[in-house]
Image: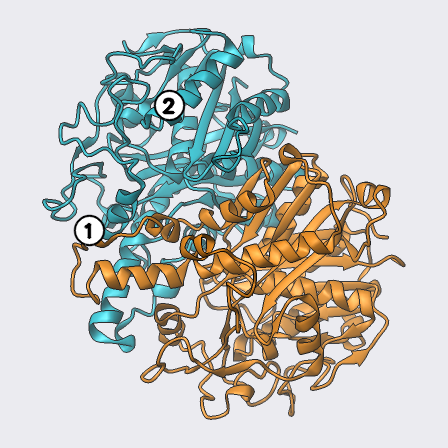
Amino acid sequence: MAGNADGRTVVVTGIGVVAPGGLGREAFWERITSGVPATRRITFFDPEGFRCQVAAECDFDPRAAGLTPQEIRRMDRAAQLAVVAAREAIDDAGGPGLTPERTAVTVGNAVGCTMGLEREYTVVSDGGRKWVVDHDYAVPELYDYFAPSSLAREVAWDCAAEGPVSVVSSGCTSGIDALGYAVGLIEEGSADVVVAGATDAPLSPITVACFDAIKATSTINDRPQEACRPFDADRRGLVLGEGAAMFVLETLESARRRGARIYCSIPGYATRANGFHMTGLKPDGREMAEAIRIALDRARLGGDRVDYVNAHGSGTKQNDRHETAAVKHALGPRAYDVPMSSIKSMVGHSLGAIGAIEAAACALAIDRNVVPPTANLHTKDPECDLDYVPLTAREHRTDVALSVGSGFGGFQSAIVFAGAAS
Amino acid sequence: MSAVVTGLGVVAPNGMGAEEYWSAVCDGKSGIDRIRRFDCTGYPVTLAGELGSFDAAEHVPGRLRPETSMMSHIAFAAAELALADAVLDPADLPEYERGVITANATGGVEFGQRELQNLWSQGPSHVSAYMSIAWFFAATTGQLSIRHKLRGHCGVVVSEQAGGLDALGHARRALRADHRMVLAGGTESALSPAGVVAQIPTRNLSTRTDPNRAYLPFDADANGYVGGEGGAILVVEEGTAARERGAPTIYGELAGYAATFDPRPGTGRPPALEQAVRKALADAGTDPRDVDVVFADAYGVPDLDLIEAETISKVFGPYGVPVTAPKTMTGRIYAGAGALDVAAALLSIRDGLIPPTVNVTRLAAGCAIDLVREGPRPSRVRTALVLARGHGGFNAALVVRAA
C-alpha cells in the first residue's frame, strides 16, 4: 500500500455518506453507479423567478436518521448531515478506539450554515424590511449559523474528540483540503485518529441567487435530470447540491493492529492557486496540473500508476476544458487511457462537501473495482477528448485513484487514494 | 526548519500599522467606543472596537472595493503593510513556494446582510454578482492570492477566535512541507446589525455602556466581552530562506503550536486549554520557566476567565508569569485576535516591554495570575505564549521566541 512520504501512512477505515439520491454509503454507491441523476426541480422553496430551478436535494429526515429533537433544533442542516455521516463512518470503522486527546475532527465546508442563517435572517429582518434587525427575535443558535466552526463542534461533541478540531473553508476545494489537512495531523503526530470529511447544505434562496448572478448555474430547467452534463457539448452550467461525507482516518499500523478493514491509504495531497481571478480559470490548467504532480510525488507514484481520475467536472464550459487540459498536462499520454468521470452529473455540486463525497466515490471504486460514470454525456465537447466513462459504470481494476477539485479564489486541489496492491 | 516572522501588518481599532498600534497599547489607549456604524439605540449592546478612521479607498483598488467585504478590505491593507515591512516582493520567490493562509470566523457579514436584504426586499435578480465571491470564508485568501501572486498553498481555517493562531500553525506546516513564505493571519469585521445581533443570545457580550467598565477580563466585575474589528497578517518565512534573502527584520520564530478542543459540557471532563499549552510548549521544546509573558485569550466571561487563569497558574505556578491582554483596548476581534496578539508578542520581544491590560481593577476570586495592569512593564522578553479560544470550545496556543 502506497505510504506517505514524510510520516506515518494514513488509511481510511470508515466511510459515511449522506448524498442526494443515496442516504448512507451503500445507497450512495448504488446511486452513482446506476448513472441515474438525483437532480430535480427544487422543492425546498419555490424556485419560480430564479435562473436555475434545479438542484440535487437529499431526502434526509433528521429524525429517521437518528438525531434527537434537541439535536434537530440546535443544528443547522449542514451540521445534521455531517453528524449523521460521521456516525456511519465510525460505525463502519468497527470501534476505532477513540481516545479523546488523540482524536481530531476536520470538517470542510464552503458557505456555512446557509439554511439556518437565511431562515433566521428573514425573521430578525422581518422579511428583509429592516437593516437594523430585531434582536428580540434572535434564536440561541443564530451565532452558530454565522460561525461555521459550529459544524466541527457538533461532530467533535458527538465523537468526544478533544484533539485539534477545525473547519477548513477554502470554498469548493474544502472537501479535498479538509482531508489533506486531516492526513497531515496524523502524519505529524498531532492525532492518531481523525474524523474528517465535509458538509454543505446550501440549497436556500440566497445561494441559488448568488450562483445565478454569475450565470454559473444550468438553465436546463425543463429536464431536471439532464441539467448537469459535464464534458457534454451541450452543457450549460453547474447544478447545486447538498450532502456530507465523513471518514475515519488512522495510521496503517493502528488499523492493522486492531484488524480493521482498510479501504485505502491517502498518500498524497496538494493544493495550488492560479493567482489569476476569483472565478476565471486560465485555459492551460497549469496550477491544477501542478497540484496533481505534487500530490503524486508525495505519494511516490508516477502518473502511469493512476487507474481512475475523479473529475471536478462541474459542467460549466470553462471548468471542463480547464480540467481536461490540466489532466493531460499532468499525466501526459496516459491521460487518454485513464477513465475519468464526474459524479456531479448525478449528485450535483455540493460546494464544500463535494470533494469529500468524491473521495468516498474513489475509496469505494478502489474497494469494488468499478468506476462510476458521467451521466448525461451523450456528445463530447470536441475540446474534451478524454475517456469520461459516459452513462454507465464500468468494471475496472482500480488501485490508485486521483481526485481533483477547483474552486473560487483560483484554488486547485488534488488528492491520491491507493489500495492494497500499490 | 524554522518559521520566522519578517513582516507585521496590523489593522486595529486603536492603531493603523504595527507601530501605531504598538504605541497605542503601550500607552493604554483604547479603541473601544459607542458603535457608530449603525444606529444601535435599541440594542442591549452598544460598544465595539470599530475601525473608525479606516478608509478602504486608501488601501483597496477602486475596482475591488465593491467586489469585497470589510474583512477583505482589512486584509488587503494588512498584507500590504506586512510585505512592505518585510521588504519582500513575493514574485521574487519560486512560484509555487509562496502561499497564503487566513482565518475568519463569520465571513463577509455586512456584505452578506446587504445582499440578503436585496434578495428578500427586491428579489433574486437584485443580488450582486459579487455576492458569491465576497461573502464566503475563502474570499480573503483568494483575493490575497490574486493580488500578490501567491500560487502555492492557499488555506482557510474557521475555528472562531482560535482561528488566527490556527492559521499561523497551518502556515508552519506549509513551510515545513515545501514553502519559502506564507502570508498568514486573520481579519474580521462582524459589525453589521445582523453580526452583532447574532451574538446577543450567547449572553457573552457585555451590555455595559461605559467603554472603561465594559470589557474586564479576570476582573471580579467581568460581565462579558466587547467585539472589535481588524486583525493582522504576518509574513512568515522559512528561517534559512529569510536569512539568505537578507530579510531586514526577523521579529522572532513561531516556535511551537498546538490546538485542542474542550469536552462537551456536562461530561465532567476537564477543559482542554491546559493540554494545548503543554503541547505547544513541548512542540517548541520550551520549559514553562522559560516563558516570559502570556498573552491571554481573556474572554471577559467569568467562568471562561477562571478556566484560563487556573490553567496559567497550574502550568506556570500562581502569579508565576506576567499575563496581559492588550485586547482590552481593541475588543475581541475573533479570528483577527490571534495574529494581532502574536504581533504584540513579537514587539514585546523587540522592545522589552509588556503592554498593559486596561480597566481591570480587582482580580476575580481564583484568578491567581500576575496580570500586567500598570504599563507598559519593562521586562526582558525572549519567549512569549499566546492563547486564543473560539466560541464552542476551540483552544489554540502558540509559542513565539526571539530568533
Residue B107: tell me if it is visible.
yes
Residue A218 at x, y percent in the picture: 47, 82
The tag on residue B201 is none
Residue B147 at x, y percent in the picture: 42, 52
Measured in 3D between alpha carbons, the distance from the residue under mark 2 to the one under mark 1, in whole angstroms, is: 28 Å
The structure residue drawn at horizontal position 50% and vertical position 87%, both measured from the top left corner, is: A224
The structure residue drawn at horizontal position 37% and vertical position 42%, both measured from the top left corner, is: B187
Q: Give the chain coloured cyan.
A: B
The structure residue drawn at horizontal position 83% and vertical position 52%, both measured from the top left corner, is: A2
- Per the rendering, the colour in which chain A appears is orange
Look at the image and name its color scheme. by chain
Amino acid, disc 1: Asp
Residue B156: tell me if it is visible.
no
Residue A186 at x, y percent in the picture: 70, 40
Q: Which residue is mark 2?
A: B305
Q: Which residue is mark 1?
A: A136
Q: The disc numbered 1 marks a residue on which chain?
A: A
Closer to the camera, A25 or B289?
A: A25
Q: Quick check: A407 left or right of B118?
A: right
